[in-house]
Image: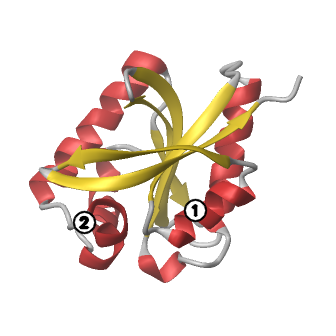
Amino acid sequence: MQQSDFDALCRILCDEEVMRAAYESAFSPDEAQNWLNRHLKRYEDYGFGLWAVVLKETNEMIGQCGLTLQQWKEKELLEIGYLFQKAYWHRGYAAEAAIACREYAFTVLDADSVCSMIRDTHIASQNVAVRNGMKIIDKAAKNFRNTEMNFFLYSAERTK
């Protein structure tokens, strides 16, 4: 992603229905800018982050998917995360992008495992994780934006 993707990113992060599934409420435009800034910094620091998912036919940004380092119970884990515009839900784009990120993590970053932290109520994202070869290995409550939410930790290990 880059700054020029901000308007498309806001169509995702500022959408109440999209964000209710992931984080309980939509972001403000300022929060969306902070989100984008964090990912631009991650590119500088780590060489990866969440990337724009763009339709080949139209060059339209329809979502974001990528790799970030996230905390889970005192451990730092490599997570595959994804968010898409509602119009593109249930079309296979999230699974396709998540699978590509898993392969990138294993082949380019030489990671031994990847995970996805998914709300226990977000069945569609759980299905994406399963399609990505992941299984639930843990459950925990996490606080995000002053709201306590239950998450499953899905994980996949690299086969040698």
Q: Earlier in the sequence, mark 2 or mark 1?
A: 2
Of 71 and 62, nearer the camera is 71
Task: Mark yes or no: residue 104 visible.
Answer: yes
Quarter of the image with the C terminus is: top right
Q: Residue at x 71, y 18 (%)?
A: 110
Horizontal side of residue 90 vs 4, given as left or right: right
Judging by the rendered image, the residue that carries numbered circle 2 is: 24
Whole-number angstrom distance, CA of label 2 to CA of label 1: 16 Å
Please say if 57 is above or below 68. Answer: below
| Type of amino acid at the residue the image marks with label 2 | Glu
Horizontal side of residue 133 vs 123, given as left or right: right
Please say if 73 is above or below 117. Answer: above
Judging by the rendered image, the residue that carries numbered circle 1 is: 126
* Residue 74 place in picture, x, y as percent: 37, 21
| Type of amino acid at the residue the image marks with label 1 | Gln
Please say if 97 is above or below 75. Answer: below
Q: Residue at x 36, y 62 (%)?
A: 22
Name the residue at the right extreme. Answer: 160
* Residue 117 place in picture, x, y as percent: 47, 47
